[in-house]
Structures are given as C-alpha cells and as structure tokens.
Image: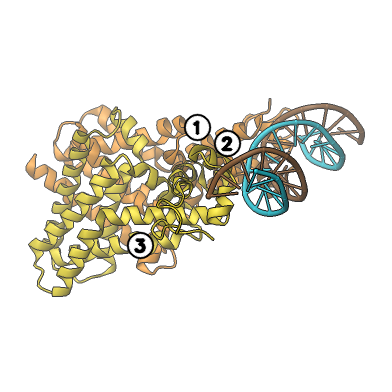
Chain colours: A orange, B yellow, C brown, D cyan
Amino acid sequence: MHVDNKTKSSKTKRSSNAHDRLLEVGVDVFGKHGFDAATTRMIAKKAGVNIAAIPYYFNGKEGLYHKVVGYIAGKLESQVKSTLVEIEERVAEGNLNGEEALVLLEKLLEKLINFMVGSPEAPRFARIVLREQLYPSSAYDILFYRIMAPMINAVSKMIATATGAMPSRAVSLCALTLIGQVIVFRVARETTVRALGLKGYSSDETAEIRRVILEQTRSMIEAMSRTG
Amino acid sequence: MHVDNKTKSSKTKRSSNAHDRLLEVGVDVFGKHGFDAATTRMIAKKAGVNIAAIPYYFNGKEGLYHKVVGYIAGKLESQVKSTLVEIEERVAEGNLNGEEALVLLEKLLEKLINFMVGSPEAPRFARIVLREQLYPSSAYDILFYRIMAPMINAVSKMIATATGAMPSRAVSLCALTLIGQVIVFRVARETTVRALGLKGYSSDETAEIRRVILEQTRSMIEAMSRTG
DNA sequence: GTCTATAGTCGGATAGAC
DNA sequence: GTCTATCCGACTATAGAC
C-alpha cells in the first residue's frame, strides 16, 4: 500500500504530492459529476498526475472516493469540533443553565452558517455530502458518524436545555428544522441567488442570513419555553 | 418527430406506451444516477422498450432528460397550484388581512410538507430537482420558473402580509428558512431517519413534522409582528 | 413503430519499461 | 514512483430489415 499524509515515507519529506493532489481534485470532480460519471482520466489530468497513480495509491477509483469522503469529513469536523467539544464538556459537568445553552447553540449555528454560507470552500465539500444524502453509498457512514449525528445531537441537547424540555423526538425534529434553515442556503444556493437577484453570497448577505436565522432561533426557543 | 402525450397519433388511441414508459423510468434512473452516469441501456431495459426508441421519440438522451424535467415540474406544480392561484387571487383583490394571510401560508406549507415528507412519490421527483440545484443544467430554468420562484414569491408575500412588514430581502430570507425547514426532511431523509431511529416517515411522523414546522411558523410570524 | 447488428468512442485497470 | 501502451468492456447513436 502507500503511506498516509502524516506518516510520511521513510525516504522523502513529502513522500508523494500525487497522493494529496488526487484527494483535492477528487473532491471537485466527484462533487461535480458524481462517482459514476466522474472519470479517473479527468481526475488524473486535473491533478497533473498519471492515471495509473490512482490504482497505485488508492487501489482504484472506489478507494480514492472513500478517501475523498474521509478527507471531507475531516474538513467539516474541523469547522465545528471545538464547539462540539465545549458543549460535550459543559453537558458532562451538568451545570448548564438555559441562557448558557442558548449561547452555545447560537455559537454552533453561527459556525455552521459562517462555513456553509460564507466559506468559499463550502460548495466543494457540500456537493459530495449532498450526493451522499441523495443516494447513500458505502461511504455514507463516514459522514453520518463524524458529522451528522454529532451535530444533530449537540443541537438537540442545547434546545432541550435552553427550553427546559426533556429530550424527545419533537426536540430532535426542532434541531433538524434549525439545521434545515442553514442548509437551505447551501442546497438551494442557485435558487436563492436567482430569486433574490444576487450575484452570490457576499459578507453582507451572509451577515443578513445569520441575523435572520439567529432571530428565528431565539423566537423558537422563547416560544417553546413559554408553552413548556 | 413524434407526438405528445395529449395529441395522440391519428392511428391508435394510445399512440405509444413506450414514450410514456421512458418518461416514468427516466425520472428514476436519471434521479438515481444523474444525467451523465445514467445510461440509455438502463432506461430502455427498465422501461421494457428498445434502446433505439430513445433517439426515435426524444431525439437522444438529452432530449429525454429535458422532457423528464418538464414532466416533474408538472407533477410538482399540480401539488400546490390551487393554493398558489388562491393566494394570487386574494392578493390581487387587495383585501387580505394578517390572519387570513397566515391561514393561507399554513395551507401552502401544509401541502408542501404533505407532499415532500408524506408522499411516496416525492423522493423520485426530489432527486432530480436536487441534482439540478447542485449543479444546474440547461433544464434548471424549467424548475426555477415553474416551481421555485412561484413558491418563494407566494411564501414571501404571505409573510409580509401576515406580519405587516414591507416586502424586503429579509422577508424573502425568512421565506427561504421556512422552506428550508420543510426540505431538510426530504434532502436529509436518510440522516433524519437514522438519527431518530425511524424506519421511514409514517403518517404519524409526518404529522409530527407538520406540527413542529407549523408551530415554528406561527412563533416566527408572531415574533416578527411584535418587533415590526 | 420496433427490432438486430454494428460503428465509433471512451471508460478503468494492468503490464512492464525506466 | 511515474510513465506508455494496451486490453477489454460499456457507452450512444445509426442503419436497415421487418
């Protein structure tokens, strides 16, 4: 086999650039065309490496795809990891009050919005994630366990704590609607941009989206707190 | 060329079943694999017609795809058309008060939820729509003008009327977050089902999703009405 | 209107030189 | 570790029989 990014080969400092370049280009080409329609020829050409490097480093097209999904999972994880850990710790301590939970929830959503809407790298990663949602492959689990489940869990817990509700299916559904309010701007970016006559998401528009979503989060939490 | 569904051939009553079967199967195969990866072989085989029928009826693979997207647009349109027309009429009359607008908004969202979450046909159509969102092709316009724009418009108008706000970018963004709360259950269906430990969306779960979204709609409208 | 046969292209993977 | 050359299978579309 070959060596990982981090455990370099014993001979050279950067064992092989081809390996890393294939991963990066794989994100774009698999994202744009999907697994079946993407061709190893496109990927190799864009990466500036020989086609034979794909079977060599990744045991073929499918092996490359799985590594690409893992690579994406790591990138997404890094965007929210610190906040997820903070939430986990505060929950473990057991002394989280409603106001603090709302602050943590807002912090997490803000990070999600900043990345999903504001980051120029988001579309590249989102395309593959959405393809896996549409039609899960054997790589779906990687995304579910590393990204989806931890996010839904954290949001649900913060909603429950902030509103004083017991964790329940209804709370989880609320968590999903909150996440939905963010991802719609990623999933339906083209539609949003065209419907609003934008040229894209500038930092002003990102800020306005953030404001709208956080406002709705607060009014939702307040309404749920009132009705119990 | 060939004849349309409606303007049958002069010889037989149902000019050609092959034409219609290709459309139906096209929805599934293009949805599952995407345009590039879908093969005319698969489609023809599943439809039980000869491969040569595709160039014959639709002028090739791309022609079939465009007809499939138009077919889907018609199906989605039919789900909400009556409510969209009702909203259009009431707005034209100019005597719509806030409560009535909220009722119409809820009616529209309910139809959207019932179809997107509750209908067994929704996944078939949604896959192609989402692919077009991900990476718009020349068929994207069909969906935008027939489905997306009218929906966003109607929801925005009802929010503005219900809250007494002037139509603005912020109102449109709110409309998108409302729509996002619905479509997340379609886009991230696999994730939702797995995270909540469901087997799928039963009518009970659809009802609970509807309840959660309509509750949040009301609390959003109330909050916006208060703050102006 | 539906079929078979086939042309012409392009896909992924491998072998083996260097 | 990277290259060229090549195999073999699968693709879309067409031609022409029926």
Q: Which residue is mark 2?
A: A65
- Separation of marks 2 and 3 at Cα, in angstroms: 36 Å
**The N terminus of chain B, quarter of image:** bottom right
Residue B34, numbered circle? none
Q: Look at the numbered discs 1 and 2 and tell me whether their residues touch, using CB distance below 8 Å.
A: yes
Q: Is residue A149 above or below residue B162?
A: above
Locate residue B129, reporting x and y percent: 41, 51
Chain for disc number 1:
A
Q: Which residue is mark 1?
A: A139
Which one is in front in this view, the residue at disc 2 or the one at disc 3?
A: 3
Q: Which of the 4 image quadrants contains residue B147?
A: bottom left
Amino acid type shown at disc 1: Ala
Give left or right: position of B4 versus A43.
left
- Separation of marks 3 and 1 at Cα, in angstroms: 35 Å
Which one is in front in this view, the residue at disc 3 or the one at disc 1?
A: 3
Q: Secondary structure at mark 2?
A: helix
Locate residue A20, reporting x and y percent: 64, 40
Chain for disc number 2:
A
Q: Which of the 4 image quadrants contains residue A143?
A: top left
